[in-house]
Image: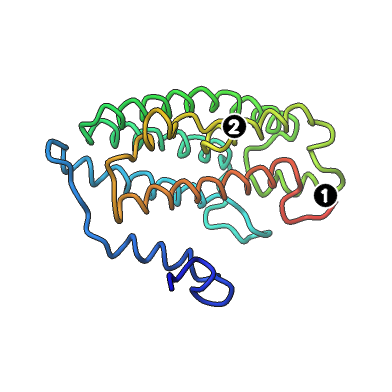
């Protein structure tokens, strides 16, 4: 019988690991007229930038890689650089579908970063700091979500658009652009794009928790 997703491991729990391993051991297919160097570098750029943004995310008091006084500014700067990997991948693929998907994704990411920046500016002005650890400590008595509810909602919507989640998944547009900017990618490049995308989702969730839900502290 066919070994479906509920067969690999206990109740299919190992299926995601098996899928990821399968992608990494497959052959990377390079399009005929693609710019090979940029085509290979684009997913690496996206993945590395998504990991670098975690440097200023505090998991506890002192449990942070780089406790920068400009943590909010650093996070916004690094997350905005992710658009370059998307644009490079669309252009280097030499595919009109990939290029159109890259333009859509870049336009959406740049547009909604403005609303995210304004939301975080409100938080920083209220607390008088750009340090993410200080922002968490300042919420010991009350979460910022309650006094800044409209700002929190605007930031959450911006996070959804920044990470291409539903209903802001237009850059993928399966019906029109097949898959978006990564349509020509396979194997490791395809896996790195999705690893970077999900690392960004986790980072945005962590930043939302830190800025509006008190981080590791209870109210």
Residue sitting at 28 percent across and 34 percent down? 88
* Residue lying furthest bottom: 10
Q: Crowding near pointer 1: few (<14 within 10 Å), some, many (20+)?
A: some
Query: Which is nearer the eye, 52 or 14?
Result: 14
- Residue visible at 32% across and 39% down in the picture: 183
Residue depicted at 40% across the width and 62% down the height = 20
- The N terminus lies in quadrant: bottom left
- Examine the image and state in which quarter residue 94 appears: top left
How many numbered marks have been drawn onto this rendered protein structure?
A: 2
Colouring method of the image: rainbow
The residue drawn where x is 21% and y is 40% is 38
Label of residue 167 in the image = 2
Residue ID for mark 1: 140
Q: Nearer the viewer, residue 9 or 109?
A: 9
Foreground tag (1 vs 2): 2
Q: Secondary structure at mark 2?
A: loop
For mark 2, does the 10 Å Cα neighbourhood hold few (<14), some (14 to 19), or many (20 or more) residues? few
Residue 148 image offset from top left, x and y in percent? 79, 30
Residue 195 point in image, percent of width and height = 43, 53
Residue 11, image x and y in percent? 59, 73
Q: Nearer the viewer, residue 206 or 182?
A: 182
Q: Is residue 6 left or right of residue 185?
A: right
Whole-angstrom CA distance, mark 1 to mark 2, is: 33 Å
* Residue 177, position as x, y percentages in the image: 37, 30
139 above or below 89?
Answer: below
Q: Is residue 15 above or below residue 125?
A: below
Which residue is most to the left? 32
- Answer with left or right where residue 68 lies relative to residue 100: right
> Closer to the N terminus: mark 1 or mark 2?
1
Q: Quadrant of residue 181?
A: top left
For residue 27, above or below residue 132: below
């Amino acid at each position: 019988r066919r070994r479906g997703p509920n067969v690999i491991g206990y109740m299919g729990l190992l299926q995601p690991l098996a899928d990821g391993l399968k992608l990494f051991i497959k052959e990377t297919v390079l399009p005929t007229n693609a710019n090979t160097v940029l085509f290979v570098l684009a997913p690496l750029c996206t993945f590395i930038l998504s990991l670098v943004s975690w440097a200023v995310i505090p998991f506890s008091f002192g449990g942070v890689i780089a406790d920068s006084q400009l943590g909010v500014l650093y996070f916004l700067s690094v997350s905005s650089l992710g658009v370059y990997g998307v644009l490079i991948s669309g252009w280097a693929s030499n595919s009109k579908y990939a290029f159109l998907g890259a333009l859509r994704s870049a336009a959406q990411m740049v547009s909604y970063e403005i609303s995210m920046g304004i939301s975080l500016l409100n938080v920083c002005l209220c607390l008088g700091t750009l340090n993410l650890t200080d922002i968490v400590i300042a919420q010991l008595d009350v979460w910022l979500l309650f006094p800044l509810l409209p700002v929190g909602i605007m930031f959450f919507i911006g996070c959804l658009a920044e990470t291409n989640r539903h209903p802001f998944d237009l850059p993928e547009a399966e019906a029109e652009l097949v898959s978006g900017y990564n349509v020509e990618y396979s194997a490791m490049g395809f896996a790195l794009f999705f690893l970077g995308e999900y690392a960004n989702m986790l980072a945005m969730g962590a930043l939302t928790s830190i800025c509006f839900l008190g981080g590791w502290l209870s109210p």
